[in-house]
Structure formats: C-alpha cells, structure tokens
Image: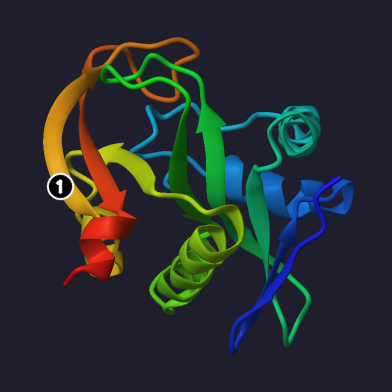
C-alpha cells in the first residue's frame, strides 16, 4: 500500500483513506464542482466509497493514484491531487500518467489548488522519476488551464474525449497538456 505524506505550508497530502468519504461526497455531490466534468456529480456516499476503494486499488496495482489534500489547521478534507495511470488510448496516448486536482467549492479561490498541485507534481517527479506527465481539462475551464500553465504544463491541442469510461460527455472538446521534465529542466 502507498504511504506518502507531503507537507505544504497549509496542507498535508496523503493517500486517500476510507474516512475521506464524507469530504469526497461534499465535493463530488456539488454540481458546480462538476461543471467542467460533464455534470456527472455524485448522488450517494456509496459512489465515494467505491471511488476511494478504486483509488486504493490503483495504489496496489500501479503504485500511484490520486492523493487527499487535508487542511492542517482543521484536519478537513479539501480535495484531491496527484497522478493516475491511464491505460487509454486517450488522444492517441496509452499507459501515461495523468495529473489532476479537484477541490470542494468552499476551498476555491484560496490558493489550495496551486499549493497542492505544485507540491504533488514535484513529489511525483522526484520520487517516481516521471519524464512526461499529461493533463486534460475542459476548454472552458480557464482557471484550471491557467494553473496547469503556471505549473509548467504546455498546451498541446484540443481533442475530442471519446474514451470510456467517460469523465466528460463523449466527443466534447478537451484540452491536452504536457509536462516534459527534460524541457522544463533545460529552461
């Protein structure tokens, strides 16, 4: 099982645990959180239990999976960040590491996404030896796109996401970003 602990000024970043289900449900049952995710928000805590179990299995099978963000001062679940091994093919890529983050709405606009994304991205590069990392987001999700670019991801193209299981509605335009460690290090 994966046991990590990344510490930032305001957050602990650690593996997702079963006790995160209530925080996950708060986040994933909010239609506004899923605005750019095809609108498929959670309708039961059982869906969150299944999601957490799936991520915990990814830790075993792939050695990687999304990580919980926990606010240090309150011990509250803020959201998740980190990597997921996607087998694809998605946008002509297979077996690649996807980078992402998601926060409960009450934590938006406070810099938590930037803080957690920066820390988890660099942890993954340093500890897992990633050379190229990819990220996807809705073309209209300007905030997420700006964060990816701030982190050093390069916009590559817009493509139609049409791979099951769908995290978005089929054939909707999706942005494709790449983080090339060699390119970043040579700047």
> Residue at image x 80%, y 28%?
46
Q: Is residue 127 above or below residue 41?
A: below
Which sits in the foreground, 134 or 44? Answer: 134
Give the total number of marks visible in the rendering. Answer: 1
Q: How is the image coloured?
A: rainbow
The picture places residue 63, in percent across and down from the top left corner, at: 71, 40
Residue 85 lies, with reference to residue 65, above or below; the image says: above
Q: Is residue 159 left or right of residue 34?
A: left
Picture residue at 50% right of the left edge, 13% below the top: 165
Give the vertical position of 57 relative to 14 (above or below): above
Residue 4, image x, y percentages: 76, 63
Query: 65 above or below 85?
Result: below
Badge 1 crowding class, 10 Å Cα cut-off, few under 14, some 14 to 19, many 20 or more, is some
Q: Which residue matches tag 1? A: 155
Q: Position of residue 3 (x, y in %)?
A: 82, 58
Mark 1 secondary-structure assignment: strand
The image quarter in which residue 81 lies: bottom right
Q: Residue at x 59, y 89 (%)?
A: 9
Seen from the viewer's position, the closer of residues 125 and 137 is 125
Q: Position of residue 112 (x, y in %)?
A: 49, 74
Q: Where, quadrant-wise, is the N terminus in this rendering?
A: top right
Q: Residue at x 68, y 33 (%)?
A: 62
The image quadrant of residue 65 is top right
Q: Is residue 136 left or right of residue 158?
A: right
Relative depth, front residue between 101 and 125: 125
Please tell me in which quadrant of the rendered image residue 110 appears. Answer: bottom left
Q: Quadrant of the C terminus?
A: bottom left
């Amino acid at each position: 099982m994966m046991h990590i602990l990344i510490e930032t000024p305001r957050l602990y970043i650690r593996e997702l645990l079963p006790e995160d289900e209530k925080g996950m449900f708060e986040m994933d049952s909010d239609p506004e959180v899923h605005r750019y995710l095809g609108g498929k928000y959670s309708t039961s805590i059982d869906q969150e239990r299944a999601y957490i179990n799936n991520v915990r299995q990814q830790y075993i099978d792939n050695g990687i999976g999304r990580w919980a963000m926990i606010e240090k001062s309150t011990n509250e679940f803020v959201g998740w960040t980190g990597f997921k091994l996607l087998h694809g093919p998605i946008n002509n890529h297979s077996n690649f590491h996807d980078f992402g983050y998601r926060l409960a709405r009450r934590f938006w606009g406070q810099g938590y996404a930037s803080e957690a994304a920066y820390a988890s991205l660099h942890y993954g590069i340093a500890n897992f030896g990633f050379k190229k990392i990819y990220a996807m987001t809705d073309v209209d999700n300007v905030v997420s796109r700006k964060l990816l670019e701030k982190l050093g991801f390069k916009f590559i193209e817009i493509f139609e996401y049409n791979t099951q299981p769908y995290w978005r509605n089929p054939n909707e335009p999706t942005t494709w970003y790449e983080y090339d460690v060699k390119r970043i290090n040579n700047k």
